[in-house]
Every structure is written in structure tokens, then in C-alpha cells.
Amino acid sequence: MTTTPAAYPKAQVGRRILYTRYRDLPKTPSYPGVITGIDTDQPSAVLLIRLDGTRCNLHMRPNYEGLHYLNEIGPVPELPMGRFIPAESDSNGFYLKAGVLLAAIGEDGEALIVITDDLAKARAAAVAWAEETDLDVDYLGLDRFEAQWAVFEWMPEDAEYPWIFREDVSPDEDQAVHIYYLPAA
């Protein structure tokens, strides 16, 4: 359902908002976003809020103190779909390590994707990631890196993961990137 809770008339789908994390209250920073839906199937209404530049909704009560309703109301922007070239983004799981992008995938982040065509850089990124996550570098098995071409594709907003990758594609395919894949030990 997308009805507006009567107690919060500004809680409308398409309304622009500013959001401040609880730990940052009462100060800023505030992050801009939009109300994408209202879940009234809960005991009290829950707003679905997508911050600009993200693909996932935050769930919050309409009276959350870090939520500031703006006067602008418009259509909810469509999420980009299809293939994309990864960029550094904590919310999408791409991290800059040793000068290259790295993503930990799998149920427990036990496999790594490093976006580079340089094996030495892939290994350095994996070592930096292991040290940052307190993982034993010897456990990684850096000799098991597999060079591949891959494409990344956005998934719908309600999918389990924000993106998937297809490996072993041709380097000529649209938006194909060279990766080093390190499977789980």
C-alpha cells in the first residue's frame, strides 16, 4: 500500500527528504533522498527511503528525528538497470584497495573480484583487504587468482544482491572489464 499516514501528511511517495544518521544527530551531514514507498502493513507506517546514489531502501518511521521533509515532490526516479562499469561505492560493495577496485562476494564474502588486468595489483589489493578485515593472508591462497573478463549487471531494487557479474565473457562485449577472480578457499 502507498497511503499516507494521517499523522504525517508530508510522508508522501516522491517527496524529497534529507536524512541524518542517528550517530550524527543533531549535527550534519544530511544525505538527500526520496520516499519510494510507504509500508502500512506494519503496526505503524514505515517509509521506504532511497538516498541519492544508492540502490537500496532504508526503512524508517515517519517521525524519525533525522528525517527532514523537503517541499519538492515528483516522480520516484527509476533505478538504472543493465550493465555497468563498477565504481568505488561502499553501499554497492566496491572498495578501493591498493589503487584498484575490489568486491568480496559470496555468502560470507569468501571470494574476491579485483578489477584490474595486473596480477600484482590484484594480489596487493587482496592483501590490503585481508589486513583490513583481520584475515590471515596465507588463508587467501593468492596463487589461485583466475584472470577473466566479466560484465556487471544491476539487479532490481528488491533483489537479494544489488548486482551480479557474469564471468568468462568476450573482451569485445559491451562494458566488459578484466578481473582477477579469487574463489573461496
Image (tube, rainbow, N blue to C red):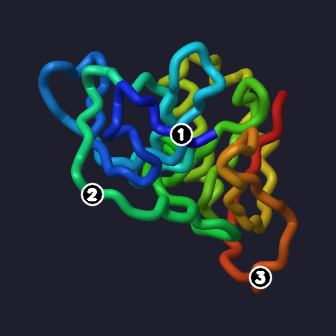
Which residue is identified by label 1? Answer: 3
State whether residue 130 is above or below residue 144.
above
Q: Which mark is residue 36?
A: none
User: Residue 170 vs residue 6: left or right?
Assistant: right
Horizontal side of 165 relative to 131 (left or right) equals right
For disc 2, the neighbor class at 10 Å (few under 14, some 14 to 19, many from 20) is few
* Distance between mark 2 and mark 3 Cα atoms: 40 Å
Residue 29 appears at what percent x and percent y? 19, 35
Callout 2: helix, strand or loop? strand
Dot placed on the residue nearer the N-terminal end, 2 or 3: 2
Image position, residue 56 (x, y; %): 56, 42
Q: Nearer the viewer, residue 180 or 29?
A: 29
Q: Which mark is residue 72?
A: 2
Q: Residue at x 78, y 28 (%)?
A: 107
Question: Residue at 23% of width from left, 47% of height from top?
Answer: 70
Q: Nearer the viewer, mark 2 or mark 3?
A: 2
Which numbered circle lies on residue 173? 3
Q: Amino acid at mark 1?
A: Thr
Q: Earlier in the sequence, mark 3 or mark 1?
A: 1
Which residue appears farthest toward the left when viewing the image? 27
Instruction: Report how far apart the C-alphas of labels 3 and 1 lie in the structure.
Output: 44 Å
Q: Position of residue 92 (x, y in %)?
A: 55, 46
The quadrant holding residue 185 is top right
Image coordinates of residue 137 in percent, x first then y, are 63, 24
What amino acid is at disc 2?
Glu
Q: Name the side, left or right, on which 183 lies relative to 43.
A: right
Label 2 and label 1: CA atoms lie apart by 18 Å
The N terminus: image quadrant: top right
